[in-house]
Image (cartoon, helix red, strand yellow):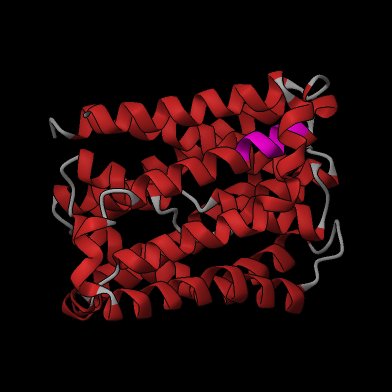
C-alpha cells in the first residue's frame, strides 16, 4: 500500500515540477529515449522462463488480452478524437497512446489489486514484444489520413528501444541470476523515476501549449483511460474469465506504455503530439491506484 502511494506521489510531484520549472526540465529532453530504454531493460530483468511458461499454460486468455489491448484502445482513441474534433497533432497523439502496448506499471497495480500477477506479466510481455508491428500499424491506419506516419522507421525505433532492451535484460538476468535478489527491489523505483522524468520533460517542453490547451483534451484522455479499464473488465467476464483474471485484464487494457508513445510522438510528429501520452500517464496511474482500493474488495 505504501509503495503504490509513493509511486503516485513521485509521478505527481514530477509532473507538476515539469510545469513549474520548465527551464530546468527542458534540459532532459535528450534523456527521453535513454530513460525509456532503461525502463524496458528493467522490465527484461524481471522476466523469468516461468513467465513464458505461463503464456503457454493459458494461451487463449493471454492472446485474448493482447487482442483487446490492440483493438479497444486504438479504436476508442480514434473515435474520441473524431468525436471531439481534435487538431491533427493531438489526434495522432491520442491514437499513438491508444496503439501502445501495455505499461509495466500495470503489473504493480495488478499486485496491489490482488489480481493474477502471472497473467498480467504474460500479457504485458506479449503486447510489448508485439508492439513493433501493432503500434506503428494502428497509428498508420487510424491517423495516416491526417498526418504522415513513417511506418517502417517507427517499427524500427520501437524494436530498438523496447524489444531489444527487454531481451538484453533477460540475458543479463540469466548470467547475473545469483545477484538479482539484490537489485530486484530497486527496479520498480528505477522505472517510476524514469517515467516520471519523461513526463516532467514532456510537460516542460510543452509549457507554452499547456497554458492554452483546452479542457476537451484532458476530457478525451480521461474518457479514453476509463474506457480501457471498464471494457477490459466487461470483456473479461464475457469471455468466461474468473473475477481475479477479469480485473487483471481491466488493468492491462486500461494501462498503456505512455513512455513509448511519448518518445514516438516527439521523434516522428511533434512535441504537442506527446502531450496526450503525458496526461495519460498521470491519469492511468491515479485511476489505477484508486481502482486497486476497489479491486482488493472484489
- Specify whether residue 285 is in view: yes
Percent across and percent down for residue 129 are 46, 74
Q: Position of residue 40 (x, y in %)?
A: 47, 62
Apparent side of residue 295 relative to residue 17 in the rendered image (left or right): left
Residue 232: tell me if it is visible.
Answer: no
Which of the image's four quarters has the C terminus?
top left
**68 shown above or below 212:** below
Residue 277 falls in which quadrant of the image?
top right
* Image position of 123 (left or right of 256): left
Side of 141 relative to 62 (left or right)? right
Residue located 76% across and 75% down the image: 153
Residue sitting at x 78%, y 38%: 86
Q: Is residue 55 left or right of residue 264?
A: left
Name the one closer to the observer, 243 or 204.
Answer: 204
Residue 87 counted in the magenta span: no
Q: Is residue 203 magenta?
A: yes
Q: Where, quadrant-wise, is the N terminus in this rendering? A: top left
Residue at the location (21% across, 45% down)? 111
Q: Main secondary structure of the magenta part?
A: helix
Residue 33 percent coordinates (x, y): 65, 58
Q: Quadrant of residue 180?
A: bottom left
Residue 140 occupies which quadrant of the picture?
Answer: bottom right
Depicted 52 relative to depicted 90: above or below: below
Say if 261 sits above or below 214 in the image: below
Q: At x 50% / y 32%, what residue is drawn?
A: 283
Q: Which residues are magenta?
A: 199-204
Amino acid at each position: 500500500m505504501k509503495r503504490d502511494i509513493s509511486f503516485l506521489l513521485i509521478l505527481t510531484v514530477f509532473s507538476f515540477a515539469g510545469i513549474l520549472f520548465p527551464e530546468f526540465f527542458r534540459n532532459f529532453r535528450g534523456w527521453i529515449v535513454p530513460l525509456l530504454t532503461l525502463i524496458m531493460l528493467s522490465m527484461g530483468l524481471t522476466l523469468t522462463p516461468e513467465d513464458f511458461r505461463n503464456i503457454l499454460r493459458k494461451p487463449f486468455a493471454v492472446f485474448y488480452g493482447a487482442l483487446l489491448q490492440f483493438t479497444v484502445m486504438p479504436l476508442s482513441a480514434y473515435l474520441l478524437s473524431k468525436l471531439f474534433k481534435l487538431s491533427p497533432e493531438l489526434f495522432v497523439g491520442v491514437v499513438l497512446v491508444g496503439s501502445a502496448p501495455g505499461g509495466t506499471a500495470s503489473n504493480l497495480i495488478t499486485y496491489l489489486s490482488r489480481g493474477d500477477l502471472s497473467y498480467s506479466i504474460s500479457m504485458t510481455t506479449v503486447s510489448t514484444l508485439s508492439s513493433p508491428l501493432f503500434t506503428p500499424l494502428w497509428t498508420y491506419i487510424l491517423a495516416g489520413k491526417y498526418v504522415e506516419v513513417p511506418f517502417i522507421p517507427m517499427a524500427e525505433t520501437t524494436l530498438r528501444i523496447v524489444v531489444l532492451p527487454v531481451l538484453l535484460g533477460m540475458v543479463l538476468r540469466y548470467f547475473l541470476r545469483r545477484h538479482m535478489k539484490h537489485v530486484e527491489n530497486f527496479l520498480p523505483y528505477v522505472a517510476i523515476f524514469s517515467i516520471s522524468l519523461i513526463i516532467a520533460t514532456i510537460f516542460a517542453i510543452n509549457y507554452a501549449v499547456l497554458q492554452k490547451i483546452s479542457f476537451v483534451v484532458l476530457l478525451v484522455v480521461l474518457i479514453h483511460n476509463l474506457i480501457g479499464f471498464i471494457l477490459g473488465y466487461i470483456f473479461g467476464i464475457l469471455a468466461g474469465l474468473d473475477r481475479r483474471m477479469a480485473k487483471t485484464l481491466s488493468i492491462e487494457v486500461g494501462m498503456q506504455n505512455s513512455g513509448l508513445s511519448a518518445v514516438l510522438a516527439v521523434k516522428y510528429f511533434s512535441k504537442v503530439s506527446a502531450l496526450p501520452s503525458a496526461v495519460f500517464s498521470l491519469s492511468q496511474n491515479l485511476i489505477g491506484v484508486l481502482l486497486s482500493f476497489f479491486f482488493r474488495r472484489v
